[in-house]
Image (tube, rainbow, N blue to C red):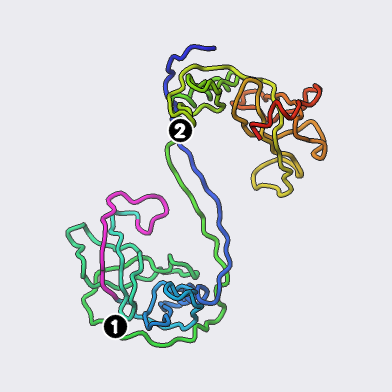
């Protein structure tokens, strides 16, 4: 057991980012292609309402709907919120309002940005119009933003074929989340120990289970865990999967094995890659040990120890 003194809690910027690729059905294809051509399309439901943005199935009846209509590029703000500090990738780099706009001819509202000098210039019920992006590709960003408008209202929704030259059939949406991660007292101690090539968990004072990685509290008993216990370094493969798809920016040849490993003395399995053995020879009960690389803060992978396989009864509760 080690001391339960509290080291300084770590903090670090963290970015989670991945490109999401999806194909478009006929309704969404027409909508996004229309934006490229400065045309806003909605869809008419079975009860006569016009939905903008359009959907492919009626939200009331669940019937498939394909009746496209064109609505105006002007509309009315139904509600709004001021964004005083725009984030990376948002429509405008200066402060702006998020607004729900019911375009003339539509029965639902579209969420987008409103370019305004300040919150005092924004009101519910104000009239606005679309400001189109100079370069349009068939995406919601083809609407650069909304702006205040003093002109006459647009007309009623009119039927539209949805046919355009070179329609957009798929999109790639770059999902990204930037935030500062603070692992907390328990995981700070866990990460610090890993930098010393040790694995440290915490034991519940009630049920006596040792959690690795530690969570700061027992998820079963609901009490704080403060006693730090060094576990491993060896452990047992409890279950595993064979990875056959190569991940971008990951220099590991496929196929390879990713496994849950119950370290000796721990009551929770952690996961890591298994190497040093053909992928088709990895098995439940395999005894493994960590392999560290210089300067790493966690094991690069686990490899077989050469010990006999663990008996199933010794790890069945962790499968």
Looking at the picture, does residue 144 appear above or below residue 197?
below
Magenta span has 91? Answer: yes
Q: Residues within 10 Å of mark 1 (few under 14, many from 20)?
A: some
Residue drawn 65% across the image and 24% down it = 263
Residue drawn 49% across the image and 42% down it = 15
The spot of residue 296 in percent (x, y) is: 62, 26
Helix, strand or loop for disc 1: loop
The spot of residue 149 in percent (x, y) is: 24, 73
Total numbered labels: 2
The spot of residue 141 in percent (x, y) is: 43, 65
**143 to the left or right of 296:** left
Q: Which residue is mark 2?
A: 12
Q: Which mark is residue 154?
A: 1
Looking at the picture, does residue 208 appear above or below residue 45?
above
Magenta span has 304? Answer: no
**160 to the left or right of 252:** left
Task: Point out the stretch of residues depicted in magenta.
Answer: 75-92
Helix, strand or loop for disc 2: strand
Q: Which of the 4 image quarters holds residue 201?
A: top right
Q: Which mark is residue 49?
A: none
Viewer-nearest residue: 161 or 117: 161
Q: Gap in Å between the C-alphas at discs 2 and 1?
A: 50 Å
């Amino acid at each position: 057991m080690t001391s339960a003194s509290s080291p300084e809690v770590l903090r670090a910027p963290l970015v989670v980012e991945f490109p999401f690729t999806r194909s478009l059905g006929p309704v969404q294809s027409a909508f996004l292609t229309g934006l490229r051509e400065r045309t806003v399309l909605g869809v008419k439901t079975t009860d006569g309402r016009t939905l903008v943005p359009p959907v492919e199935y009626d939200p009331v009846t669940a019937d498939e709907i394909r009746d496209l209509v064109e609505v105006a590029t002007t509309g009315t703000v139904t509600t709004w919120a001021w964004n005083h500090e725009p984030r990376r990738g948002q429509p405008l780099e200066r402060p702006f309002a998020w607004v729900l706009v019911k375009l003339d001819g539509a029965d639902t509202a579209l969420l987008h940005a409103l370019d305004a000098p300040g919150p005092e210039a924004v009101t519910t019920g104000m009239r606005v119009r679309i400001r189109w992006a100079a370069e349009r590709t068939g995406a919601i960003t083809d609407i650069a933003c909304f702006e205040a408008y003093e002109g006459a209202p647009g007309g009623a929704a009119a039927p539209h074929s949805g046919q355009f030259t070179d329609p957009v059939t798929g999109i790639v949406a770059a999902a990204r989340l930037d935030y500062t991660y603070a692992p907390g007292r328990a995981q700070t101690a866990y990460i610090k120990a890993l930098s010393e090539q040790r694995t440290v968990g915490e034991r519940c004072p009630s049920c006596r289970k040792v959690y690795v990685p530690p969570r700061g509290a027992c998820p079963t008993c609901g009490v704080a865990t403060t006693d730090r216990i060094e576990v491993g370094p060896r452990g047992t493969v409890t279950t595993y999967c064979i990875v056959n798809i190569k991940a971008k920016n990951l220099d590991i040849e496929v196929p390879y094995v990713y496994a849950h490993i119950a370290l000796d003395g721990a009551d929770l399995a952690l996961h890591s890659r298994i190497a040093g053995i053909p992928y088709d020879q990895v098995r439940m009960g395999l005894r493994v040990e960590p392999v560290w690389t210089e300067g790493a803060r966690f094991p690069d992978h686990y490899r077989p120890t050469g010990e006999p396989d663990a008996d199933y009864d010794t790890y069945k509760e962790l499968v």
